[in-house]
Image (tube, helix red, strand yellow):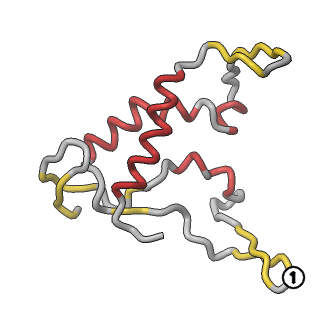
Amino acid sequence: MKTGICQLCLETKPLIKNAHVLTEFLYDDLYNDKHKMTAFKFSKGQLKRNDNVQKGTRDDSLFCQKCDRFFGDQYENYARKFSIKGLKKGYEPKVKSYDWGVEIFNVDFQKYYRFLLLQLWRMSLSKLEG
């Protein structure tokens, strides 16, 4: 492991190698049965399949193990319930429909919003281009 300054606790510690910049479950529904990501690109009027797609963006200069685990325990595990796979596993938010929209119950929006802000923050910390 590379030693550096953890972007959360700001201590010099071994940093996680190849940590995901974005939480993987946000895009894991794009994987096929063999855990390969398939992408398509439109080029010269044709849709072409591209099977050589990098799986996620990773950075080894973000967080130590303890801080990365904190994110997972506090926010990612909660937000995962709202992913497609989480909903398929039986989590059902209570929803009430109105003419003007919907009202959702039994969701800790503060926690979910923190998860979303965490994703933006992680992207802003990454030194990777693109």
Near-viewer residue (97 or 68): 97
Horizontally, is 39 left or right of 107 in the view?
right
Given residues 129 and 68, the one toward you in this image is 129
Q: Secondary structure at mark 1?
A: loop
Q: Quadrant of residue 117?
A: top left
Residue 36 point in image, percent of width and height: 64, 64
Q: Decide: few, some or many residues near mark 1? Use Cα within 10 Å; few <14, some 14-19, many ≥20.
A: few
Closest to the observer, 110 or 33: 110
| Amino acid type of the residue that numbered disc 1 sits on in the rendered structure | Gly
Q: Name the residue: 66% across, 23% down.
A: 91
Q: Position of residue 130 (x, y in %)?
A: 48, 70
- Look at the picture and state if 79 lies above or below 96: below
Residue 68 figure quarter: top left
Q: Position of residue 41 (x, y in %)?
A: 75, 74
The relative height of residue 70 versus residue 122 in the rendered view (above or below) is above
Residue 116 position within the rendered picture, expressed as x and y whole percent measured from the top left:
50, 39
Residue at 17% over, 55% down: 5
Question: Disc count in the image?
Answer: 1
Identify whether 130 is placed above or below 13: below
Which of the image's four quarters has the N terminus?
Answer: bottom left
Residue in view at x 75 percent, y 71 percent = 40
Q: Residue furthest bottom?
A: 44
Q: Is residue 51 left or right of residue 55?
A: right
57 sits to left or right of 98: left
Residue under pointer 1: 45
Of residues 114 and 5, the one drawn nearer to the viewer in this rendering: 114
- Up the image or down, 24 lies above or below 3; here it is above
